[in-house]
Every structure is written in C-alpha cells, then in structure tokens.
Image (cartoon, rainbow, N blue to C red):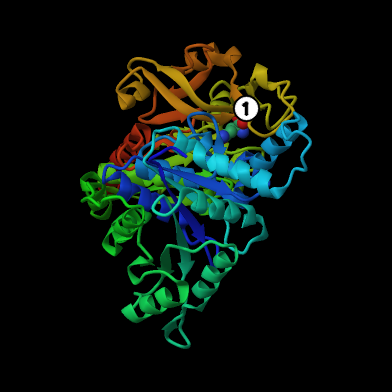
Amino acid sequence: MSDNTKYVFVTGGVTSSLGKGIIAASLAKLLQAQGYKTTIQKLDPYINVDPGTLNPYEHGECYVTDDGAETDLDLGHYERFLNVPTSQANNVTTGRIYQSVIEKERRGEFLGKTVQVIPHITDEIKNRIQILGNSGDYDIVITEIGGTVGDIESLPYIEAVRQLKWEFGEQNAIVVHLTLIPYLSAAGELKTKPTQHSVKTLMESGVQADVLVCRTEHELSDKIKVKLARFCNVQKEAVIQSIDASTIYDVPILMLEEGLDSVVLGKLGLTSRTPDLESWNEFISRLKNPKNEITIGLIGKYVELQDSYKSILESFIHAGAANEVKVNVEAIHSEYLNKENIKLKLSHLDGVLVAPGFGERGTEGKIEAVKYVREQKIPFLGICLGMQMAVIEFARNILRLKGANSTEMESNVPYPEIDLMEQQKSVTHKGGTMRLGSWSCTLKEGSIAEKVYGKTKITERHRHRYEYNNAFKDQIEAAGMIATGLNPETGLVEIIEIEDHPWFVGVQYHPEYKSTVSSPHPLFVDFVRAAFEYSKLKNSVSMA
Ligand code: GLN
C-alpha cells in the first residue's frame, strides 16, 4: 500500500439498481471539492472480460475510456462528475481477474501450487484495487463493488475487502454500504429489516459496514436512524439518508447536507473542509431554470432502454444547461420508421440525433430519418453508425448510387460506402478488437467542427470496426458532403458536414463520452444552440 492513500469500498445491499455509481461519484465529487485527489474504480462480478461484448439490453451502454478500455457505464458518471479521465485500471471484471490468474498459471508463475479462489483470485483482486492507490496520484480511491451482497459471484470481492481492511488498518479503509429502506404503504411505514439483513450478510463474510447510505422515498426519522444504528453496529451519524432526487446532479448536494463527506473523512482520519462547489451549483441552477425548451429526436434501436444511450442523454443535459434550454429527448425506435410515417414522426422535432449501433436491424429507418432532416434542413447530429447512415443516405439519394450500403449490413454491396478497415479484416476475436479509444483528428478550416471546437487539432474516443470508404470521397465531396475532420496519420474520415444545410454534422467518434458537468461537449452545446435557433425559425414561420 502506498503510505498515504486511503480506500473507501462501496457495497450494495437489498436490491440492485440503488445507484451505487451515483453515490460513489457524489462522494468523490465532495472529496475532490475539498482538495482531495480522488478516483473511483468499479469491480464487476460477472465473467465477461469486459462489457464490450455485452448487448446494451443486458448492461446498458458500453463506456469507452481514452486508453480504449470498454467499460461499465458507471465510469461515465465518474468522469462526468469529476472531470478526470478514467482508464482500464478503473474497471475490472471477474473475467479479467480469472484471465490473468489463469495466464500466470500457464506461465508457471505459481511454482506448482494449487491455484485457488483464496488466495490467488483474492490476491489478484487486491492487486487490482491497489493499482490506482500505488500510482501515487490519489489521496483517496473509492472502489465500488458491483452486484449485491449475498450474491455468490460477489463473495471473492467481499473477501478481498475483508483482508484489505485488516491489512490497511483503521482509518485507512472503510466500507460504505448502500441499502434500501422500503416504504410499505399498507402499513404506512418505512421498514429497516431488509437493511439489517444485508448488513448481517456482510458481517457473515467478516466485513462490518462503517457507513450506511439508505435509499428511501420518504424522510428517515431520527427514530429510524437510531434503530438502524443500533441493529447494524454503526454510529447514528453514519446513517445517511439518500432520498430520491429529481436529477442525479443533486445527489452530491444532498449528500453534503447529510454529511456523508464529513463522516467518511472523519473515519479516514482526514480533515473536512468547506467544499468548493461554486461551478457545480451554477450548473444546477442553469439546469433547473431554463429559459427555453426544445425537443430532440433520439433515433436508435435500443431506445426502450434509457441506459443504452446514457452518455448521450447526459450530454444533452450538460449542453441544455450551457444554453439555458430544457432539452426534451424523444426516443424514436428506428425499426418502425419508414417513408410513410417519417413526416408524422419527425416534423415536430427541433433537431435529430441518429445514434450509434451495430448490425442491420433498424438501419433503413435511420437512413429514412437522415433523408428527412437533410431535406427539411433540421439540425442533425449523427454519431458513429449515425454518421455512416448519413453517408449512405447521401450516396443513395444524391449520388444516385442505388443499393449503396455498409458492408456490415450487406457483404456483397454494389457501392460499399462504408467498409471494414483493412486491419479489421483478419480480426476474429470480438472483445477489445475494434478501433478503440482516443485518436487525433485534424479539422478543416471554416467548417462547423472547427468553429465549434475553436481549434483544428482534437482527440476523440472511438468504438467501431467500419469506416467511411475513401474510394468514394472525391465523388461525395463534389456533391456537397465534405469531410471536415481527418485522422492526420491514416486519412480516415472522422467528420462529415453538408455544405448546403444549416447544421448537418456526422462524427465517426463518440463525443458523448467526453461531455462532463464542468466541460460540456462543444458539439452537443452547438447542436442544442442550432436546434433552438431552428425552433425559433419554425415558430416564426408558423406564426406568419
Ligand atoms: N457498427 C458500426 C461499426 O462497427 C458503428 C459502431 C458504432 O456506432 N459504435 O463501425
């Protein structure tokens, strides 16, 4: 252990989906705002090596870091709250732990010993927990343990926490346990029993919770806090209420009011200071007091599940606050869009975002949507697959290249406007093999992109296998769709814009991964501005 790094473990009890990620991020925010260098790490108990191979229906969006790690969406919250980039070290799964233990075994590193969950798997978990702490970059590392205590697959993690608490000693490692206090309307009462049980389950594994964060729909009375403290072996001040909030961005403020930061710092033997939350509070006040309102259509094939497009939705919240505009995002399922209903579905919108995605399902609806917004001059942002759809639509309807498509959708396509990258052709393994992570891009002077970013050199994060096919570039540009962002080394097209359109931008990368509260993404900010301009124009025309 590095001499001065302190560790906070966040576990969850009673049920999943209590928002451990938001509590961890909120605590980290409060500690950061007091001058403590803080980072957060997520340990996921499933066997996938990373979430990259998981369908969004399973686990929501896959979040990508600068170093190209495909990670849990909670890392997105960490970055959005802290404005500090995360990396591969911030997300570890059971699959990755086992993979590295098995690789060590194959290399003979265990010298003939029987390889077992304890100590080998738990040692690997402990090492991963300490990588960030040992880097010397942080005063406090918050480690969120995925899943719920009592799950079979969480046991090695809880055991690793138990061992580390002993090794680090008091004031160096504590456990914050997040639980639910359900309200039984028939009895008219909040119930503490499920929390008592989940704290006991943790104790069966030898881990005593130091702080309880209690999710609740109703205020916790003093009586309930005393009861929880008594039954769960914690101080009354360490029973923290976490009442439902109207936005996740309120949670740090609510936790501050409840004193979560000072209880944690006290237990770690660190001093509490007054947190500097001025810019955070300014953001919240802009978010809650919008002067105008717009509606953006989010066109995708996983729209029934909010978590699938988490970073996009959050980016709109940041960009809306920056513009003092409330952005209503209307989820539109691309599979059900066609020539006949497109006007009905899109004509009321002030802007349209065509979402990233994989596979053929819903792509024809996305192409139909691009055609409509291109012709109607509605502001358009296409991200990754959304940008690829814009190129295909342009080829089909402007260049009249009938049957133009991506080779992802059709292998024998007559006009492969989007094609597999050369390096991808020999790839057979699925995990971690796409074009991933941060790549640089040079912007064309005078383009919307250059105006928006205010510079000509940028880096953005990628996650895709297919690319704009440069064989068609001259023809496409001559017809008015300009490649305004290029990878300086490879010449790959990263951004397209249509000259004869007020705001039509497609990006091969994912800007949504880099939008944070203190640094809203410029593309989203300008897209929202353009959509608001368009809504004013639309209203003035309809009034005339
Ligand atoms: N399926 C496309 C590709 O692999 C787009 C990926 C994405 O939208 N993230 O290139």
Viewer-proximal residue among 514 and 68:
68
SS label for mark 1: loop
Residue at which label 1 appears: 465
Q: Is residue 146 left or right of residue 190?
A: right
Q: Position of residue 309 (x, y in %)?
A: 50, 46
* 388 w.r.t. 372: above or below: above
* 277 w.r.t. 182: above or below: above
Q: Three-letter amino acid code at disc 1? A: Arg
Q: Please tell me which residue is depicted at 32% across the width and 48% down the height of the picture.
A: 31
* 420 w.r.t. 371: above or below: above
Q: Is residue 191 visible?
A: yes
Viewer-proximal residue among 33 and 361:
33
Q: Is residue 328 left or right of residue 91?
A: left
User: For mark 1, does the 10 Å Cα neighbourhood hold few (<14), some (14 to 19), or many (20 or more) residues?
Assistant: some
Q: Position of residue 540 (x, y in %)?
A: 25, 44
Q: Please tell me which residue is depicted at 26% across the width and 62% down the height of the picture.
A: 257
The quadrant where ligand 1 appears is top right
Viewer-proximal residue among 389 and 22:
22
**So how many labels did they put on this image?**
1
Q: Position of residue 114 (x, y in %)?
A: 78, 43
Q: Position of residue 238 (x, y in %)?
A: 36, 66
Q: Is residue 315 visible?
A: no
- The reply to whether the residue tagged 1 has its Cβ within 8 angstroms of ligand 1 is yes
Q: Quadrant of residue 54?
A: top right
Q: Is residue 391 left or right of residue 99?
A: left
Q: Quadrant of residue 48?
A: top right
Q: Is residue 313 left or right of residue 281?
A: right
Q: Quadrant of residue 417?
A: top right
* 139 w.r.t. 189: above or below: above
Viewer-proximal residue among 95 and 376:
95
